[in-house]
Amino acid sequence: MRQYRNRLTLIMLTLIGLSMLAAGLAMVTVFKQSHVQLLEDNMVREIRLLQTMMEFPDADSPDAITYYTNRSIQLEELSESRVTFILKDGKVIGDSESDPLTMDNHAYREEMLQAVKEGRGSTIRRSDTLEQDMLYVALPVKAGENFDGFVRLSVSLKAVDQGVRQGWTVMGIGLLVLFLIAALVSYRVAKGLTSPLEKITRVARRISSLEYDARVKIHRKDEIGQLAQAINGMADSLQTQLRTIRDNEDLLQSVLNNMTGGIVMVNGAGQIILVNRAAERMLGINAEVITGKSYRELKQHYELTKLMEQGLESKEGFHEERNIYYPVESIIRLDGVAMMQEEEQESYRGMLFLLQDVSDIRRLERMRSEFVANVSHELKTPLAAVKGFAETLLGGGVTDEKTSRSFLQIIYDESERLNRLIGDILELSKIESKRIQMDYSPIHLSAFFDTISEMMRTVAEKKRISLELDIPEELFMEGDEDKLRQIFMNLLSNAISYTQEGGRVKLTALEKHSHGNAEDIVEFIVKDSGIGIPKKDLPRIFERFYRVDKARSRGSGGTGLGLSIVKHLVDLHHGTIKVESELGIGSSFIIELPILQETQETGS
């Protein structure tokens, strides 16, 4: 901007200088012309005065040249002008500075010709003798029969030139002073014009550097003020648009980051341009590393890359499921969507791949299928026994009363087992669908487990199993008493069933402080010295109908749903359950329940 200011100042000074120079030339020209015109008019008056006052003898007389030469010398002293007497034919008969006899004919001199034609002649030409400009003025003069010719006066223009030079000097000094003043004024004017432009330029550069809060602080009503307002308006618009874009980007990024499904976007060249967190987690990749690279970099997922390749080649959508084994084994549903430009249907921009982990869904479907199969199998066995023994009795094939009663007892036992199985299925269904009412109330644990001990001690004594309870007298907690009784009856019953005769079952309770949150918990441990559980079965023991020793559990009258019911009831109490076991040594079921239930869950 400083360069523009200097250029503007130079342009203004040039224009002012040229104007002043033209004015000076015009003034000098007018001055010189007016001075010369004044001299010429004076010389004309002097010639006419001379014509009136002077006597003109006969120009043809022998002493005419002498007379006119002397008179011209006298007149030069009086008028300070060169005086020349010229006859009509151009012959010089008197001159104040030269010998007339040696002078050439003056008939064709410019001033003579003009005098003949216009009655008055004047010209300016350089005198070779004097080496200076001379003004010549000639006027026709006729004095009777004695003289018919011209009187010419000439005067040096040295004084005029000197006056012009003095005028140039004075005018030059004046012009120089005016030029300096004009330079100062021009610079101030240029600065006044460019200074707000510099401010506007600085603000524009700040805006281009993403400083959208920059504003031009100029309050004027001229074009520069309008430009400043336009810049400020543009900055306001950009700031508003940028805020909207950032809000939309933040919202879009938040949506992408919090989606449970994975997104991988691949452009038409096969480069990955977008990966969200869910896709990172599913595929075990890092978005910062993989973005900008080819989708073929996903080498550990060969099946997925083949599907991506097919989608990019066909440019058509698809829906497929594939198993992946890294970072964990899972089932991924991959939906491919071709991305097209909305305005131009033929503009292909790549593929959008949506990834969804359907492992849990498929596992639940498998569990549902297994559950139906298990229920069918569990129901089929007692029904077949009841039907077989009933047909035998109805056929009259048994006449012995003792045998008949034995068959009837079996029918009764199998029907009871069938009834328990149906009851457990209904109970588990209600628990899983959250349709049971949780009635939380304070429970004195010592008294609570005394009632459970009385019910279970008879069963334990039949197998000579020692049943021990270690419950602090002062320990209280909040819970649903019926549901808690169901939990510990199931665990103690299982412990007694899977413990050999002469074994030991112990239940302990201990108040603890949880490190994960501020609430206190009660830890219950049901420990037995039974047969134990193989490590491969530990992750599945809480599944429905899952039995470690299928033959023995059926023989004990178990339905295979007890531990599954226990797991769900513990969840309803906002607790956790885990198991530790070693084959041949025994098992320990560890339950942690909060002392206070903060939320009351009511099934609908």
Image (spheres, rainbow, N blue to C red):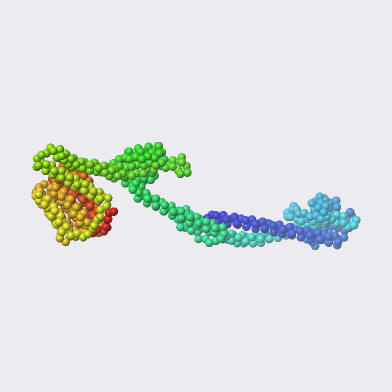
Looking at the picture, how far across and down is residue 565, in whole percent? 22, 49
Looking at the picture, how far across and down is residue 577, in whole percent? 21, 51
The answer to which quarter of the image holds residue 447 is bottom left
Look at 64% across and 60% down and name the residue there.
175
**359 is higher (above) or lower (below) than 593:** above
Look at 32% across and 38% down and name the residue there.
303
The answer to which quarter of the image holds residue 53 is bottom right
Relative side of 494 to 210, left or right: left
The answer to which quarter of the image holds residue 138 is bottom right
Relative side of 134 to 175, left or right: right
Look at 53% across and 61% down and name the residue there.
219
Relative side of 482 to 104, left or right: left
- Name the one closer to the observer, 89 or 168: 168
Q: Can residue 94 be seen in this view?
A: no
Looking at the picture, how far across and down is residue 568, in whole percent? 23, 51
In the picture as drawn, the residue positioned furthest to the right comes out as 145
Q: Can residue 268 be seen in this view?
A: yes
Look at 41% across and 38% down and name the residue there.
315
Looking at the picture, how far across and down is residue 178, in whole percent? 62, 61
- Name the one closer to the observer, 56 or 499: 499
What number of labels is visible?
A: 0
**62 is higher (above) or lower (below) than 408:** below
- Name the one closer to the observer, 487 or 36: 487
- Name the one closer to the observer, 394 or 305: 394
Relative side of 387 to 332, left or right: left
